[in-house]
Amino acid sequence: MCIRLHTAAAMPGFGHHGHHSDSLGSMAPPSRSGGGFGADASGAVWEVGLVAMPAFVTQEDGRSVRPLIALVVESRGAIRSSAVGPDDLPLQALEPAIANALHDPQAPCRPGPPRRVVVNRVELLEQLPPLLPPGVLISKGATPQLDRASKLMREQLSAGDDALGTQALTTYLTGDIGPEAVARFFEAAAALYQRRPWERIPGDGHLFQISCGVLAIQGWVGCVIGQQREHYGVLLFRSLQEYDRYVELGERFEAGDRYAMDLAPPHRAINFEAREAMPRSLLQEIQRYGWPVAAGDAYPTVMLIERPMALRPPRRADLQQLEAVALALLAWIEAEPQIERLWQQPAPQWRRFRVEVGGARLPVTIGAVLAPERSPEPDPTPAASPPAPLKVPAALRDTVDSLLARIDPFCARHLNDDYRALIHDAVAALSRKRPSPLLTGRESSWCAGVVHAIGSANFLFDASQSPHCSAATIADFFGVATSTSQNHAKKVRDLLKIAPFSPRWCLPSLLESSEIPWMLELDGFLRDIRSLPIEIQVEACARGLIPYVPALRGRAPGRT
């Protein structure tokens, strides 16, 4: 994933208001599969999830919020219950939804507990157990009936949008914003685009920090995107921690967790769009007022993203903040002809400028965010047992050896021997592809991509894990842009079919500490494969459903 603006909206614009319903009707059950591995379990299996409403609701205090809907759906398709709560207090929706599902479900469902529950978000694994009877197995996995109900709900809500909602998605003049304020923002945005900061700032991992007390900008952290010539703009976060969280969730999203970005911290952006990507109503408004657009059809849009990934309509204060950021970036680039060197300095160098916003000249401070100092490098020579011999084509032996010579010091500094073994296996597997992708591209890019791919599959970017490091740490170590590391990681994941808990690409410690890789449905019943006879374990392993035969684990070293 290159750093980009993720939004729930398909078009640029500013959030909207809408109506919602507190309950949904039941749906037709899907067809059942036969027995054997992967068979459906019965109506006692629930799919539980939190779904962001595709509409804003205006509260009494004038704030626009986007509520969550908690849904409980049977595996056969019937909706047992639903409840609405605020996005920052999910339990206010989950508690009544689960209580109703247990004791007073919607017809034709009957009261009673489930045998197991499948959830669509990782955090529900911790939030649900206190709400369910003891002994109910909870796991994260595919939720097709929940997704189907969510889609139906979104279609129903979208059909109920009023005229105000449509207008809010197709105008710059929201809240107390007038044409003059938009004109000043367009002027600042056009000047910034013409200076093309993505050609001056090396990568989206080269962050800056900005403050303007008058406009309530306190140490915001931002990055310029566009170095890959895909999406152009500026992203802004309230702190470095929130930026890191955004990157971490983006990694999870790219790895297949389609709900990860719902947890993204609030952030805002100046986003540049081509003319063909702009809604007609916005183009007409720009033409009507004569707002200036930079050459190259660089139409600016304002993005204020609140949790869970919802666009909030801006007010004049928001627009002035983004105008000040654009002007400060422009002044900084003009004042630093060799701006790329600022990130190589031993200490941050702050610049202070005065920018004109709303008819007043305001002081703004801006500077580069430097990477934290690294501890002295340990001896990169592996202290543990040497890695197992790799099966590598003779023609690529030198290439593989060169890649591993770059990767091993990173493993010694940031990872462990188990990670190193998986990464070695991945490099060898890539060398055996026909044709091998390692024959093209830079070695540093493939090094970063392989480490990134194995790391993301084993939750390396989760700060609660050990070892742990960020995606930026990987990119910086191998001397590539964050987006390059992420793009090559996606290639590696696709080529080798790497995903969380993949039997072949999962850390042994993760396999031993988690029940998820071992839980399989056998003839309609969810079972821990480790408690079943050895012949069933062998069959499951032969099908690639488990990483090894647990019953044989103690009889021979290594994986079976």
Image (spheres, grey):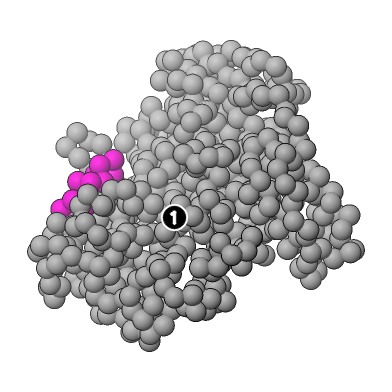
Q: Position of residue 191 (x, y in %)?
A: 62, 31
Which quadrant of the structure image shows residue 406? top right
Relative to residue 110, is residue 342 drawn left or right?
right
Q: Is 248 situated above or below 53?
A: above
Residue depicted at x 37% and y 36%: 314
Secondary structure category for the residue under label 1? loop
Residue located beneath label 1 in the image: 514
Q: Nearer the viewer, residue 49 or 234?
A: 49
Q: Position of residue 47 (x, y in %)?
A: 30, 65
Which quadrant of the structure image shows residue 354? top right
Residue depicted at x 18% and y 65%: 113
Q: Nearer the viewer, residue 210 or 257?
A: 257
Q: Position of residue 292 (x, y in %)?
A: 55, 37
Residue type at numbered disc 1? Ser
Q: Nearer the viewer, residue 455 or 91?
A: 455
Q: Is residue 83 magenta?
A: no
Residue depicted at x 85% and y 65%: 393
Q: Is 230 situated above or below 220?
A: below
Can residue 184 be seen here? The reply is no
Magenta stretch: give its range.
86-96
Can residue 37 be seen here? The reply is yes
Circle 1 packing at 10 Å, graded few (<14), some (14-19), many (20+), is few
